[in-house]
Amino acid sequence: MLKIDTVTKSYDTGAQHHRVLQGVSLHLAAGEALALTGESGSGKSTLLHLAAALDGFDSGEITLNGAAYSGLDDRGRAQLRRETLALVFQQFSLVPSLTVGDNILFHARLAGRPDPAWAAEVTRRLGLSDLTGRWPEALSGGQQQRVAIARAIAARPQLLLADEPTGNLDEDTATRVLDLMLELVRETGTALWLVTHSEAVAQRVGRRVHLSGGVLA
Amino acid sequence: MTRVAWGALISHWRRQPLQLVTLILGLALATALWSAVQAINAEARASYARASEQLATGTQAIIDRPGGGIALATYAQMRRDGWNVAPVLQGRIVLEGRQVTIVGIDVLTHPAAAVTGETPDLTESFLAEGRLFARPDLIARLSGVPDLPPLQANAAVPPGELWTDISVAERLLGQTGQLSHLLVLDPIDAGDLAPGLRLRVEEGNDTVQLTRSFHLNLTAFGFLAFGVGLFIVHGAIGLAFEQRRALFRTLRALGVPLRRLMLVLSIELLGLAVVAGALGLVLGHLVAAALLPDVAATLRGLYGAEVDGALALRPAWVLAGLAMALGGAVVAGTGALAKLRRLPILAGATVVVWAENAGLGSRRQAMAGVALAVLGVIALALFDGLVAGFALLAGLLLGAALCLPLCLSLMLRLGHSAASGPVAQWVWADARAQLPGLSLALMALMLALATNVGVSTMVSSFRLTFTGWLDQRLAAELYVTARDDAQGAEIEAWLAPRVQAVLPIRSAGDRLNGQPATIFGIIEHQTYRDHWPLLQADPAVWARIEAGEGVLINEQLAYRQDLWLGDQVTLAGQSMPVVGVYSDYGNPNPQAIIGMDTLLQLYGDVPNYRFGLRVPPAQVDAVRAELAERFDLPPGGLRANTEVKQVSKAVFENTFVVTGALNALTLGVAGFAILTSLLTLWTSRLPQIAPVWSLGLTRRTIALVELGRSLMLAAFTALIAVPVGLGLAWVLLNVINVEAFGWRLPMFLFPRDWALLTGLALIAAALAAGWPAWRVARVPPAMLLKVFANDR
Ligand SMILES: Nc1ncnc2c1ncn2[C@@H]1O[C@H](COP(=O)(O)OP(=O)(O)OP(=O)(O)O)[C@@H](O)[C@H]1O
Ligand SMILES: [Mg+2]
């Protein structure tokens, strides 16, 4: 369902031209789980952002369910983000003016498929039930991260992208989060692609790719 | 260390030049509006002072004949009898579309001639060449008029007057052998006055007293504009501090003491204030110069007070303007500095917590607002007069402004709970989070809108009343002024068979309870019964007037002396009850009306040379033409009521030009306040926007939401501003006008005006929000993505 074909991406920082991705190619099928590893600063987040249609790339092509990103305008990309995929950011991605409970429901409602029962279950399983009335900024980093994950899972996306979703979590909670995501993959055919530094997580996911020197190995 | 801190702080402005401009412009605008009003007031006061100190010779005894002139022969006889008097022939003519007063004097006897004679041979040339003396600005205006005697500038002549020799004045006024009055130079008793003449002491110029309320009005407007301007400065300073928060933290973490940092920031603030103040003074001078002609027209129209067209630069004004700018900066900056003191070195409070705290603050603010409004009402109840009226106005406006955030937050909460879709829900929630940052600007908008509604309701109500009143008051179709009683009698006899009625307009001067007043006599006629604008009347009012059993007084007199139906008024030693009160707009002086027989009985042979004519409308032009042909009437001696109405309406409109201009400026300033606040909030906007963008809203949608939110808040503000403005109008009509002018006006509602004004407010908000929204629509994704990576 997700196809990445020799994508390159570079950042201009003043005089410097910094090439982060130098021809990345990848194929991810529905119902498949994939781990992405790589050194800090190697471009993992950048790659995930491109896959989530958040930013443009220099060359190559990305297609999701057959739709080529380079042919989409702002609205097309927004629709893709809203209805087809979900991304869990590394940090700070909650809507500050909505409560935790509203945040969790938010994406599913935007996508037009709210499912309060499912959202409540996700909330419970991620241990967030007591926090739904709070404001995001009154949460710890790990709690915020779990809310972001709950929001993504509650939306039942076809493609779930997660940038170090367990980075801020203790081992126990991390296991629970991963269980939930893999369950989603099994039950609904969601494709999962997650970035991790943890060898254990990568092993549980199964298939893995490594980003180094701007290319995947 | 200080130098390093300076460098770091100043570098901020190099990267944000626009923000520097906003800050300086905001303070400059506030100072400009305030000092423009001050400049106008100072100029007007200086003009009054000149008028009363220089030639108008202050308190002086004069001899005149009420309603008519003094014959030259009478004057000559009085000189022979030993009266030490100087003759004056004074009258008004229209030159270059503007009324000027011609003052003809006898240079040998008139005491002011010495003042006029700045050069030794002036007396001679005055007589020989018949020059006209006037202030330079008037001369400049008259330079193109043909057939005028040579003009000579002289700063000692009162504004709006042309001084010359009597013979020249006779020619210009088209009047020979007549004097308007005699100045008594030496109050020796030289025997009785000839019949019909009277000796009276001319009151010192009371323009200062009369115009006080007008200037108080302007000052109040100036304060309002300054207050609105302060909101801008507050916003801009808040922005400058907000954006450098990270820098402050870093500097503190690197060991710059808090006190040093605050000192440096205070110096920076004062420096900016001086620059902005100077700029504001320049702007203020320009605004004042642009408005002064209209103000002068207003004062002339309302009070007959003359004000120069030129604006002088006064050192006191410059200092006051700068002090105001500095004071404003201190007021606006104290809050920001206090915040800096409390700023923790590690991470700061964020938007939602801020909003929650503000919720608590807004309740406290609203309570303070209610208290202020109540204090205003108490002030009015305890004290009389204009100052108490303005205290009520200030209490009402400030109180309403303080209540605004709570009202808006309640409205938003209502909207939020009613919202169903996810986007709508976010929009409402987000608007609530934004409210504290915008509330100052919205308060400014509300003040501007409420003042606009209030003042325009007052003006429109006044216009409606005034127009209706003119129709009643000018019921006669034609007005004739003869040269003297002889010609008057001739005309009256000639007219009698030709028109429906000749209504003589005869009056005498008297004092009513100590105040100089004019007493009119009227004959028995249906016109008065049908048209006279009575506010309060005895059922048998006209019968009693005709029978000499009562007196009508004007509203001004009624309010000032608290005289109403049944109260006694003493006229020429005879006490009479008030049987009616009539409205008499545009006239600052007391007036009374009695039956014609009573007038003649009490005041002797009062002049009879002015008449109102009732003529069938179709015949007006014919009668007029015949009159003009048959009689040698003085210039302006024949007027149709339509002309008089037109002139009166023009004067009326002129009166409120300045008010309109100040209104528009205030609204502009409020729009500017919204812009600066939105720019202030811009930095804290990205973290709000980025998450919803990542979840699939386009930047365009978000930009539209941003715009819509500002419009929604502006609309809510307008919704609250309308009733506040109506309250303001009520106070203006029922308290301020009564105190200032002596008349109470009925209030009319003009919903179309409110709709228009709300539309204007929305346009102002759209203009102010447009640019930040456009920035949202164009923000690069990389910048939004940074939100998810950066520490903030
Ligand atoms: N907006 C940007 N402008 C310039 N350079 C950027 C930008 N965003 C990322 N980079 C650079 O691109 C490279 C890849 O960054 P990215 O965030 O993708 O790394 P990462 O693999 O996710 O690292 P980490 O494991 O620490 O999260 C880094 O060297 C970073 O400095
Ligand atoms: Mg990363």
Image (cartoon, rainbow, N blue to C red):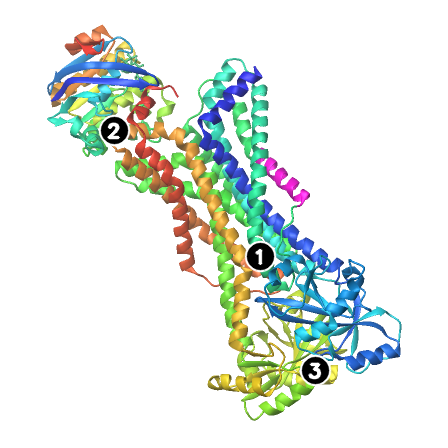
SS class, disc 2 = loop
Please state which amino acid type lies under the numbered disc 2: Leu
* Quarter of the figure with the C terminus of chain A: top left
Q: Earlier in the sequence, mark 3 or mark 1?
A: 1
Give how far across and how far down residue B120 sits, in percent. 81, 59
**Separation of disc 1 and disc 2 at Cα?**
60 Å
Check disc 3 and give the amino acid type: Pro
Residue at mark 1: chain:
B
Comparing B484 with B757, the one in front is B484
Which dot marks residue B695?
A: 2
Q: Earlier in the sequence, mark 1 or mark 2?
A: 1
Query: In the rendered image of this protein, does residue B697 appear above or below residue B166?
Result: above
Q: Residues within 10 Å of mark 3 (few under 14, many from 20)?
A: many
- Between B671 and B119, the residue placed more toward the observer is B119
Q: Chain of mark 3?
A: B
B101 or A5: nearer the viewer: B101
What is the span of residues highlighted in magenta in the rendered image? B314-331
Q: Which comes before the other along the chain, label 2 or label 3? A: 3
Residue B362 position, x and y percent, is 48, 38
